[in-house]
Amino acid sequence: MQLQSLQIALFFKELINERPDLQFKVFIEKFSDVFDNMPTQFPIPPGTPTEIPFMILNSKNNLNSCNISRSRIDFITTDKNYIKNEELIISYLEEISKVQDIFQFGFVSTYFEERNDASALIRNKFLSTKEEIKDVAIRYNKQLKINKEIYNCHFSISDINQQNIFTQTFEKGLLMQKDINNVLLNTKNEVLSTAKLKSLFKGSLQTLYTSDVDAK
């Protein structure tokens, strides 16, 4: 399967209340080669859900984006130059943790393989039925140990018909996503240090960058 995208989700311990263009100024400047398009800002009326982005950074080739809301920041890349660039991701984690305290994280890798028998593959691996089925989606949490601590690893596997952003054609195949996170596990809302975030990401690499659903 081909690694299609990588997402780094970081959740703030405290909500952002000041102007993001000022708070994230150093970060925006440092990553100007990654997000080389003009940042977009949106007004946030009172009562807007805290996860709605009020600033979006993206690249001119539309392969990299960064959504900043009051409660979280999400870096998403489909760029082959960055998707497995460990040094870049580590630098990103360092810069964001300088701006905001982080207490939850999510590292998400998405894989896709074009094939016509995706439904049958999922059925044979995960289901007991032998009947022909379509539009299959399986999701489960297989917790894993990173640095002697337990974290969630949510797997989702489905057969889809998706549009290729480059050719604009539709491709039928198998989509798999791995989401390593500590949601509902950090019950004390402890701040994750920069060193801890870096260690967690490095400890997640084998699972994130392997298309095998049984990867440890």
Image: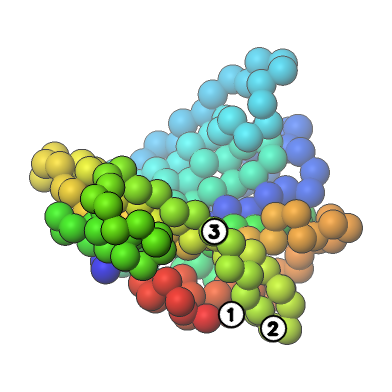
Q: What SS does tag 3 mark?
A: strand
Compare marks 1 and 3 and give the one earlier in the sequence: 3
Residue 93: in sight, yes or no?
A: no
Count the numbered circles shown. 3
The reply to whether callout 1 and callout 2 are in contact (CB within 8 Å) is yes
Identify which residue is drawn at 45% across, 42% down: 57
- Report whether 10 appears left or right of 1: right
Nearer to us: label 2 or label 3: 3
- Most foreground residue, 13 or 137: 137
Residue 184 in percent (x, y) is at 75, 54
Identify which residue is drawn at 58% across, 40% down: 68
Q: Quadrant of residue 79?
A: bottom left
* Type of the residue with mark 1: Gly
Quote the CA–CA distance across marks 1 and 3: 21 Å
* Type of the residue with mark 3: Tyr
Compare marks 1 and 2 and give the one earlier in the sequence: 2
Q: Quadrant of residue 135?
A: top left
Residue 177 in percent (x, y) is at 43, 58
Which residue is label 2 attached to? 147
Q: Which mark is residue 140?
A: 3
Residue 8 in percent (x, y) is at 53, 57
Residue 82 sits above or below residue 156 on the image: below
Quote the CA–CA distance across marks 2 and 3: 22 Å
Residue 49 in percent (x, y) is at 66, 26
* Type of the residue with mark 2: Asn
Q: Where does the N terminus fall, quadrant-wise?
A: bottom left
